[in-house]
Image (cartoon, rainbow, N blue to C red):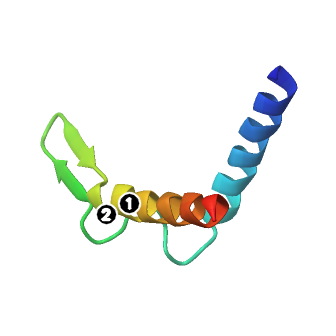
């Protein structure tokens, strides 16, 4: 189980590296909220969360069929 979890984490890391090279970057989609003040900043990725939720729901739906 630990080996499987480790492989999943390595796969997720490679996926993050590959997704960083796409022209559409996760975390900078329309709908993501970013507010920067003098001494602080606030970031809430609503658009990214919605996109990931839709993609994971679609994958789970396909797997269950």
| Residue 47, disc | 2
Q: Residue 48: where, in percent of width, then height?
A: 38, 60
Vertical placement of 25 versus 42: above or below?
A: below
Instruction: Answer whether residue 27 is visible to the viewer in this image.
Output: no
Quick one: SS at disc 2?
A: helix
| Residue 10, disc | none
Q: Is residue 37 left or right of residue 12?
A: left
Looking at the image, which is closer to me, 39 or 3? Answer: 3
Question: Label 1 vs label 2: CA separation?
Answer: 4 Å
Q: Quadrant of residue 63?
A: bottom right
* Residue linked to disc 1: 48
Categorize mark 1 by other alpha carbons within 10 Å: few (<14), some (14-19), many (20+). some
Residue occupying the far left of the picture: 37
Q: Residue 9: where, in percent of width, then height?
A: 72, 37
Contact check, label 1 and label 2, Cβ < 8 Å? yes
Looking at the image, which is closer to me, 55 or 26? Answer: 55
């Amino acid at each position: 189980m630990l080996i499987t979890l480790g492989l999943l984490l390595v796969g997720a890391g490679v996926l993050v590296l590959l997704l960083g090279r796409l022209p559409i970057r996760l975390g900078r989609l329309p709908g993501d909220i970013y507010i920067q003040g003098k001494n602080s900043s606030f970031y809430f990725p609503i658009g990214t969360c919605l996109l990931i939720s839709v993609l994971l729901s679609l994958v789970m739906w396909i797997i269950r069929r």
